[in-house]
Amino acid sequence: MAVPSSELVGDLKTLRKGRGLLVTQIDERVGPALRELCGVTDGDGPMEVRRKVAARLQGLARGLPEDLCVAVMAAFAIHPDARQPFYQDRVRWVAEYLRRDERTARRRVDEGTGRLAEIAMASAGNGNVGPKARPAGWHIEALRVSLVLDQASPETFEQRRIVADRDDLDELDLALTLPYDHGLPGVTHDLIVDVFYGGTLIRKAKESTDRFGFALALPKRLLRQETHEFALRFRVPDGQVMRPHHTCVSKHRCDLFDLRVRFGRTTPPQQIWQLTDAFQRDVDDPTPHGELLEVDGAGEIHLQFSHLTPGLAYGARWSYS
């Protein structure tokens, strides 16, 4: 399978809307990544498409914890006791089944959908890495970011606690995307990275026009399930303009993302939107979407996200005009 997990997650979230797998025009609802995963062909009729997709998702869901398995099977209207015509009604059923509130049930569905995509990619031998790359070997237990905008140049302080998923982990491959306006003449584009604690920066390179990759050598080799914390500071050079948003788009499992943005009290943005489960292309969409936020008395916002879906964006965007 050659599609990234973000596309598969998007197809899964599209499928679970409305009647889910029981939608009349099922062949139009199943996206290309999901069709490839389930072996759906152009000659398959609606009944065959529904059968293939249901069988594949049920098989993958067996690898999930019981609560997540029930949540996703209900979300797609595959569970025999949760075939209500509306997605929100099925979420309500999940809440009652798990004896939790609807907000928690929705999180279980989102987490299960993301994990389902991870299992699918792993079973296909692709994951979310390139053909010559190896699995990360670690995941993020907690990512805490503080972005300061009320000074001459933007500055971000980032603390991470990671968990090793294999033995002898001694190096972390990291990356940060810093979009900028390519059409402005004479504008430089760089990123200054400083290590505060927890490792040594051994490599930094520009992987694409906007993306900076770097490697952090750990102080010692980690064993499987061992945790490690480190802190980095990212600075934008003087005079370089930063796009009005900050998001986390994790390729791998991330259990917690804590974001603080300090705009300052004198000139806060006119509008701020929270981004949750957003597609990367929507972060810069001319028409912003998301829950509207307000700064507090210090001119700051504080957001928390749990169990992020790999490949989707979480964070905030803002506008001064």
Image (cartoon, rainbow, N blue to C red):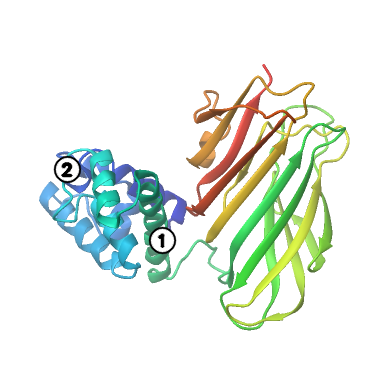
Where, quadrant-wise, is the N terminus in this rendering? bottom left
Where residue 82 appears, as percent x and y from the top left, is 18, 50
**Which residue is disc 2 drawn over?**
84
How far separated are the C-alphas under marks 2 and 1?
24 Å
Q: Residue at x 69, y 68 (%)?
A: 172
For this view, does 86 lie left or right of residue 256? left
What crowding class fits label 2: few (fewer than 14 Cα within 10 Å), some (14-19), or many (20 or more)? some
Where, quadrant-wise, is the C terminus in this rendering? top right
What crowding class fits label 1: few (fewer than 14 Cα within 10 Å), some (14-19), or many (20 or more)? many
Where residue 301 appears, as percent x and y from the top left, is 66, 35
Is residue 278 visible in the rendered structure shown here? no
For this view, does 264 lie left or right of residue 257? right
Q: Quadrant of residue 39?
A: bottom left
User: Which mark is in front, 2 or 1?
Assistant: 2
Q: Which mark is residue 115?
A: 1
Sequence order check: which comes first, mark 2 or mark 1?
2
Is residue 29 visible in the rendered structure shown here? yes
Q: Residue at x 54, y 48 (%)?
A: 305
Q: Residue at x 65, y 19 (%)?
A: 270
Residue 138 lies, with reference to residue 190, above or below; the image says below
Nearer to us in this view, 130 or 94 = 94
> Tag 1, which secondary structure?
helix
For this view, does 84 lie left or right of residue 154? left
Q: Which amino acid lies under the numbered mark 2 shown in the image of this protein? A: Gln
Nearer to us in this view, 162 or 284 = 162
Where residue 73 appears, as percent x and y from the top left, is 25, 56
Q: Which amino acid lies under the numbered mark 1 shown in the image of this protein? A: Arg
**Which residue of the protein is positioned furthest toward the top in this rendering?**
321
